[in-house]
Image (tube, grey):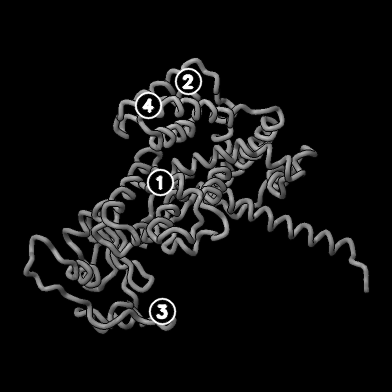
Amino acid sequence: MKPIKNSVRVKVVRRFRRIKAASARMMAVRGHGISMIFQEPTQAMNPVFPVYDQLGEALSIHRGKEIIDQLLEATPDAPELQPAIERLAEAVQNGEKLEQLKKLSVEVGRAAHLRSFGTQAFYAARSASAGNSDALVHDLKKATHRFRLGGYQRSMLKYRRTQSVQTDELREVYMKEMREGQMHRLLEAGARRRAISVKWTHPQFAIPILRRRGEKPLKDELFWEAVGLLEGVQIANPVQVARCYPFELSGGMIQRVMIAMALSSEPAVLIADEPTTALDVTIQAQILELMRDLKERIGTSTLLITHDLAVLAEVADRICIMYAGHIVENAPVQSLFANPLHPYTRGLLASIPRVDQPNKQLESIPGSVPNLINPPEGCRFHPRCPYAMPICSETRPPMTDEGGSHQVACYLYHGPNVVE
């Protein structure tokens, strides 16, 4: 067996470093810069890990610095914490409604300088009986011990915070390159060295038992943060659901877990592929409201992929109609519903029942979707189009602007400008 030459070994190491650097670059963008809600959530979650573990992993990767800072700055001995807990216990004893308990629980979390403690206080208060207010005070006082950090735990959190800061720095570099269209550029030497691997710098961090003990406050914090996310997507009993495994949940529940995971990182771009397919109408409205709130609060751009034109009419600013992989019409939502131009768009709208026209006969588009391995020449809709002309089967129609930012790809129209 011939020995491996140094030049070959160097080439292998360099290639491996390039792969690691590319993986780190994608990891910095995926999830935080761009997040996605998948159409089939059961295939997107790991069945051997509980829900809180998978939600907590997403939180620690994309919001680790923020969560660790809250944990390091928590004040379990704050003077205003004890009165806030007693006010919550008094509200439980008086039988106050959940809205009032929620408001007082937020005050508890604010007094402790730890948002997740407010979530924990709310669910402890909701499960407490009216005559058990003293036990509630005792349980919440006992719960404050989880963020009384020892020296080893604090050093562990500070190290994890350093890792999160490095990840944030790399993410900013990559997002800047993505905005400037320079994602092809290699990392700078210093950034590449940080991205190659993350090693434990403290010798005790390599011992599994000590590492788990040091990470316990962070694990508890991520659990209650995950419960808060599940509450935000209107899941009943989020504490119990957080401890479940994905195979124990229904399709609609897993769908909401996936939506919570996608929204947790507050991404710049959210791709939602049929996000409300497995949900009933009331939950669908709540999820769409969450997506709209994310857009208004942090400016998230949402790319919604759906067959439900009613959902698009509710949430979209602009609609692209696609057929067989090609965009055939692109218009503002009001313009498209008021004046659909392409025959395929007209066929879609004609097949929807209307409340104001109960006697209207629903129409269907003749034929079937073509085989995309061997698609038709020219316009891909021409075999099913009632207005097809000979030219439609020869060349693909260009996208033209018909005014008011309404664009269509059809030979029935001859707009003044061809959109490239």
User: Which label belongs to residue 271?
Assistant: none
Residue located beneath label 3 in the image: 372
Q: Position of residue 390 (x, y in %)?
A: 26, 84
Closest to the observer: 289 or 318? 289
Mark 4 or 3, nearer chain start: 4
Residue located beneath label 4 in the image: 104
Amino acid, disc 3:
Leu
The alpha-carbon separation of the residues under discs 2 and 3 comes to: 63 Å
Q: Is 284 placed above or below 227 here?
A: below
Tell which tag, 1 or 3, sits nearer the viewer: 1
Q: Could you classify mark 2 by the number of other residues whose Cα lies within 10 Å: few (under 14), some (14-19), or many (20 or more)?
A: some
Mark 2 or 4, nearer chain start: 2
Which corner quadrant holds the C terminus?
Answer: bottom left
Amino acid, disc 1:
Asn
Q: Position of residue 282 (x, y in %)?
A: 27, 52
Q: Is 72 placed above or below 285 here?
A: above
Residue 239 visible to the viewer: yes
Q: Residue at x 37, y 28 (%)?
A: 131
Q: Please say if the residues under marks 1 and 3 sit with CB atoms less than 8 Å apart.
A: no
Residue 77 quadrant: top right
Residue located beneath label 1 in the image: 237
Classify mark 1: helix, strand or loop: loop
The alpha-carbon separation of the residues under discs 1 and 3 comes to: 45 Å
Mark 1 or 4, nearer chain start: 4
User: Which label belongs to residue 81?
Assistant: 2
Tell which tag, 4 or 3, sits nearer the viewer: 4
Q: Residue at x 93, y 72 (%)?
A: 2
Tell which tag, 2 or 3, sits nearer the viewer: 2
The alpha-carbon separation of the residues under discs 1 and 2 comes to: 26 Å
